[in-house]
Image (tube, helix red, strand yellow):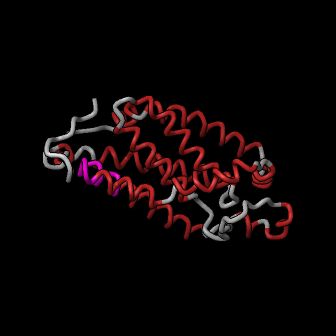
Amino acid sequence: MNISIKDVLYKVRYFFIPYLIVLCACLAVKILFTREQIYFTVNSHHYPIADTLAPYFTDLGDGWTTIIIAVILVFFNYSRALLLGIVYAVTSISAQIIKHIFDAPRPKLYFQNQLPRIYFVKGVDILSLHSFPSGHTVTAFSTALLITYWCRNKFWGLPLLLLAMFIGYSRMYLSEHFFEDVIAGSVIGVIITVFLIRRLDSRRFMHSAKWNKGLLTSRPAAQNS
């Protein structure tokens, strides 16, 4: 089964097209404003309910969330579990390699002389190193895009994109990352995932009866249209 990049992008169009629009807007913001201006603008807007919800949104971008989804998929569809596992492994390893190449300071270290100006959410462990890119954002956008690819109703791409964006924003809100860390994380997650889907989902065995069932199913799952 031969799947092209165009085929993949068409299936995730309700995720990808709005994402491109948001990405262009974010790049414009980055060009017009400095790192410090963007960071302190985000940091100056804090609310009790956001302080409560942001850590939960951030946790959704944690690798364990994706791993749990992959384990659940093993019970229903080996092919999808394998694809999600490989996509997560490749994107997360790529993010970690880039992190260690750049070894960029996080906001707490970067603005160490301006700490009194910074609002930190209580109870959150604030890291200092390996800021670029945001690994949580890589995982969030990668997983959201892959789920969109699988959804029968492709309109789910829009709420999944919004969820990934909230996760990315939570990384800035919690002072774990800069704006550019999140932008780069989203780009890395989307690009690598699209190419992996094209590469792996084109494999014949991924669409075989044996691989399109799980531990709890006895018949092949229906393929997306």
Task: Give x and y (percent) for residue 108.
Answer: 74, 67
Q: Is residue 69 above or below residue 1?
A: below
The quadrant in which residue 13 appears is top left
Asked whether residue 5 appears in the rendered view, the answer is: no
Q: Is residue 125 left or right of residue 86?
A: right
Query: What is the number of callouts on the image?
Result: 0
Q: Quadrant of the N terminus?
A: top left
Asked whether residue 113 appears in the rendered view, the answer is: yes
Identify the residue at image location x=64%, y=48%: 169
The magenta stretch is 74-85
Task: Give x and y (percent) for residue 62.
Answer: 50, 59
**Of 216 and 192, the residue lying toward us:** 216
Identify the residue at image location x=40%, y=30%: 154
**Of 69 and 15, the residue lying toward us:** 69
Q: Is residue 119 left or right of residue 84?
A: right
Identify the residue at image location x=41%, y=35%: 12
Q: Is residue 13 above or below residue 194?
A: above
Task: Give x and y (percent) for residue 171.
Answer: 63, 55
Q: Is residue 133 above or below residue 161?
A: below
The quadrant in which residue 151 appears is top left
Is-magenta flag for residue 77?
yes
